Amino acid sequence: MNRILLFCSLCLTTYLIHAQNYSLPLEGITKVIISAETNIVVQGHTKNTFLLKESDNYKSTNLEKSAGFKSLTSNGHDNTGFGVEVSRNGSLLIVKGLRERRESNLKILLPQELNMSIESLDHNDIFIDNFSSEIEAINDHGETVISNITGPVISENGNGNVTIIFTKLNQSSPSSIVTTNGDIDISISASETATLFSKTPRGDFFTELDLDIISENQSRAKRRTVKGKLNGGGIDITLQNLKGNIYLRKI
Amino acid sequence: MNCKEIEQNLIDIADHNLDNIHNAEVREHLEICDMCRNSVAQYEALFSVIANQKMQVPDKIISENFHKMLEQEKLINLPSGSINRKKTKTLWKPLLKVSSLALLMIFSYLFGAFSNENSLSKKHASNIKNSSDINFISSLMQLENESASSRLQAVNFMEELENPEEEILDALIRKMNNDKHLNIRLAAANALNKFSSNELVKKALILQLEVEENVNMQLELIQILVQIQEKRAIPSIQKLLISEKTPHYVKEQIGTELKYLI
């Protein structure tokens, strides 16, 4: 009888551990800084919490055996049970993915208004969706897809495409998207106001928006630079691509 | 001492009002925390500007009119011609209150102006062509902001200045060389392009090209240096052309640029 009870309690403990999400209230946090060697997926939600859902993320299968132990790697200390280290530094929340890129995505839910800085440390992709805050994204090798946002966005890609869909355009802070070897694909509502600067030394600039091109004294080096106003001009958006093309679409 | 305690005591730290024990604790923390060190430096710079503000001397006519008005007020309010000590005291108190309020408003305005990101908008910049002290210190503070977009806004603002002081150029050079984001580094290089007739800027562009590893930055610097016909950059450009690290497509672009310099 005792053995049956022990077995049942073990099963229950295992189930409870597996069913647990990692949630952290974000009072006093103004920015989240995330870095990982896996694909990073960040989605906005309406709660003021940092959330790692058990259903979305890889979780260690040895939790019952390691209960009460500290999980250590050379990169840091897994204090979430999801192979992620979370720590505070003043008003910043530092989130470090400790797993390697062959493993599943790191998916994080954050408040829609919280500023963030995301860095992919290996050949992986970054997906960010549903935010009205400032977004910084650095990706050396891989795709960066940022959708349903208002900006500002500061995005830098080495090798890989950048796709950004602005649902609305924040008019108080400028955006800048820079890539070395890939395409930049931006979608903006045709009714928005913006001042766009594009530079494509070895690529082309395509747009379906009606831009008023600002004619400046064009030196030879600036021939592949376009400055244009959308609906009379507004917040600055800089698009710079060394090798690929720039596409500016309307939504 | 931790970051929160530093934040709560920023004004006392920057104003050197702490006792030796607390001061030692603060210095110990500042040695290991870049963010707090920057915050303290910004406040120290702010206090320095406030301390160095020149006293505004009113125009002679305004001064005379003010004194006339004051005499008239005295005649209206003091018909008896005699003031007892008690009455002086009651007049002094409201004056003190008003002065304190005015001082508080001035300080609030200054702090507000420095922390307001929107004050750095280009529209504003186009109206103010000279780097006044407040704009100057405000821009320098924004350049160290945690937000990359705010730093970009500060760089864009500085680019609009007509005759930036050396401190502004130094700050732009630091951003071009060291900012974490390539976007800000490129924007700073682009801003410096406007001031590339300055020898300090020329030297900074040449020196950075010698050590630059990012291909986007290499090309940006080369284009600026070719545009200003800076022949001192030729050895660095040629070095990149033969380097195995330089991608083929970048070499092609560099080769094209170099033709216009030799």
Image (cartoon, coloured by chain):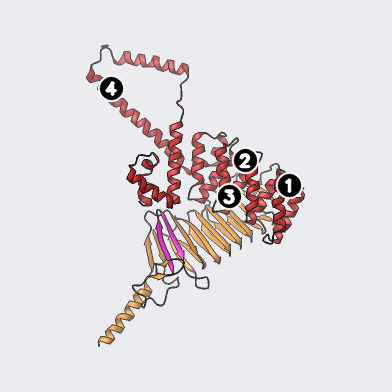
Name the residue beneath numbered marker 3. Answer: B177
Name the residue beneath numbered marker 4. Answer: B91
Colour given to chain B in the rendered image:
red
Marks 4/2: CA–CA distance: 57 Å
Say the numbered circle drawn on residue B200.
2
Dot 1 falls on which chain? A
CB contact under 8 Å: marks 3 and 2? no
Name the residue beneath numbered marker 1. Answer: A220
At label 1, which amino acid type do we have? Arg
Mark sitting earlier along the chain (3/2): 3
Magenta stretch encompasses residue A140:
no
Residue that appears at 71% across and 48% down:
A221
Q: Nearer the viewer, residue B133 or A202?
A: B133
Q: Residues within 10 Å of mark 3 (few under 14, many from 20)?
A: many
Dot 4 falls on which chain? B
Number of labels in the image equals 4
CB contact under 8 Å: marks 4 and 2? no
Marks 1/3: CA–CA distance: 25 Å
Q: Residues within 10 Å of mark 4 (few under 14, many from 20)?
A: few
Picture quadrant of residue B109: top left
